Amino acid sequence: MLLRLHEVTKTYPDTEAAVLREVSFTLAGGEMLALTGESGSGKSTLLHLIGGLDTADSGTLAIDGTDLSALDDAGRAALRRGTVGVIFQQFNLIPSLNVAANIAFQARLAGRHDPARDRALTDRLGLNDHLHKYPEQLSGGQQQRVAIARTLAAQPKLVLADEPTGNLDEATADTVLSVLTELVGETGAGLILVTHSERLAARLPRRLHLRAGRLT
């Protein structure tokens, strides 16, 4: 099992109620699911815990057999470099690097930079004519494609996508999701897609819904 959560709970100091309450589920390699829920339901918090960007108060969370509670900050950072890839809604591209360098960045950190893979990704994502450009010279859809390429170039086993189409128009969002699921499917990685869109969630084979910190 690629991902296993058992009764994961998270509370922040400035809140009385738990943001996440005894969340349990598993995800196999190659499996894709949509995570939905209203704003404040705990979706981003859950993604941050899985990505090692935060730690749970209780429960167990294991990725590829590694218990995240046993890792320190450096260990969780290494997990993000080598096992988990995160695609953010705000793209988080590096402004001072051109498209080619942005795509190679994560893979270089992971020690997996493969120029041939980069070329294959940019070809599939329609980025070959933009490799010399900088993020500010790209449209929102193009920046999101670069963010997808950067994540997949590092060959993660688990891809976390936090509202990756939230800043895109409907047609562009459909295209980006299609390319994302196709490329992730070809690698055999697992995918968790956080989305507010019922329409996009329906395109994935499995769905979980968070309400007030609990899965329903």
Image (cartoon, rainbow, N blue to C red):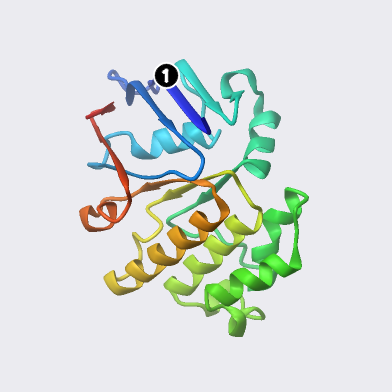
Q: Residue at x 41, y 57 (%)?
A: 164
Q: Residue at x 45, y 66 (%)?
A: 179
Quadrant in the picture for the C terminus: top left
Location of residue 33 by image quarter: top left
In the picture provided, is 122 more to the left or to the right than 139? right
On screen, residue 34 above or below 108: above
Q: Position of residue 58 (x, y in %)?
A: 45, 14
Q: Residue at x 60, y 73 (%)?
A: 122
On screen, residue 199 above or below 97: above
The answer to whether residue 51 is visible is: yes
Question: Which SS class for mark 1?
Answer: strand
Q: Position of residue 132 (x, y in %)?
A: 67, 81
In the picture provided, is 20 more to the left or to the right than 158? left
The answer to whether residue 97 is visible is: no
Q: Position of residue 207 (x, y in %)?
A: 29, 42
Location of residue 103 by image quarter: bottom right
In the picture provided, is 177 more to the left or to the right than 169? right
Mark 1: which amino acid? His
Q: Which residue does the numbered mark 1 point to in the structure image?
A: 6
On screen, residue 8 above or below 182: above
